[in-house]
Amino acid sequence: MDITTPRPSPTPAALPAVRISRAEEVYEQLKRDIGEFKLVPGDRFTENEISERLAVSRTPIRQALVRLQQEGYVEVLFRSGWRVLPFNFEQFEQLYDLRMVLETTAAHRLCDDGLHAACTVNRALLGELAAIWLAPLEGRSADMAQVSQWDEAFHCTLVSAAGNTEMARVHRDVTERIRIIRRLDFTKPARIDATYEEHAQILGAIQRKRGDQAAMLLRAHIQSSQAEVRKITLHQVHMARQAGLG
């Protein structure tokens, strides 16, 4: 080959796949365990126990636990392993307040399409939400775990549809931090019916471009969930673990 001939760039298929580190895998697994109530506030465990359960060496486990400690999920106990931290209800209150600001702002933007030059409303995303939440009674899901996941996706999608990527990024962070608490909101079947009705009303207001009404409905919806958070007991958490809510 002529040495002046440039070598062809590798095709996307030839590029090596991005590998997730063991520490990242352990971090994600332990975070899921906490979010799905396999590990609940007050539970104690050692690095050796995690190592045996996940078949991973202690180094990535320690790296994952330090990261979870920095994020406020666990704490290290002097010479006796680790403990899942109790719920910080004051922090949850603040996160719910922030969530309310973000979502009501998004509702106004969704109803004022075209007034914000830097943000383009994604109507296709709103259509996807309508297919789930405006379904007839016979088309509704009765699976509490499924509806809990759809509920989270509903609120994230509303903010994403408003077109402000930075707002959506902050909202996703808030959502992740309150996920475990929100799942406890779906331990009662009546909550499923209420969620369908409230989401349908919010979507209806957005479709009619009634920003004030949509924001008012969202605020009431979030405040209702926030009020339930204040009633959460450790007993409910253990019941959720037994029920396999995650």
Image (cartoon, helix red, strand yellow):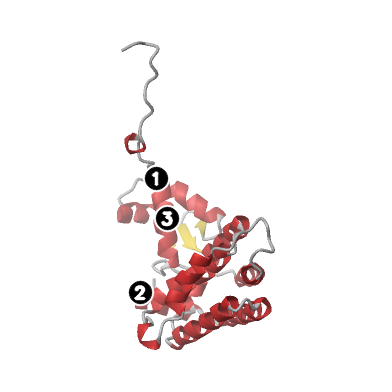
Q: Is residue 135 above or below residue 72?
A: below
Residue occupying image coordinates x 39% and y 87%:
137
Q: What's under tag 2, amino acid-wise?
A: Gly
Which quadrant: the C terminus?
bottom left
92 on left or right of 65? right
Which structural element holds mark 2? loop
Nearest to N terminus: mark 2 or mark 1: 1
Amino acid found under the numbered disc labelled 1: Ile
Observer able to see residue 69: yes
What is the CA distance from the residue labelled 3 to the residue labelled 2?
Answer: 18 Å
Q: Nearer the viewer, mark 2 or mark 1?
A: 1
Front-most of 103 and 228? 103
Residue that carries the numbered disc 1 in the rendered image:
20
Tell me how many marks there are.
Answer: 3
Residue 11 in the image, given as x and y percentages of width and height? 35, 34
Q: Secondary structure at mark 1?
A: loop
Residue 156 place in picture, x, y as percent:
53, 66
Between the residue at mark 1 and the residue at mark 3, the CA separation in whole angstroms equals: 11 Å
Would residue 78 be visible to someone looking at this image? no
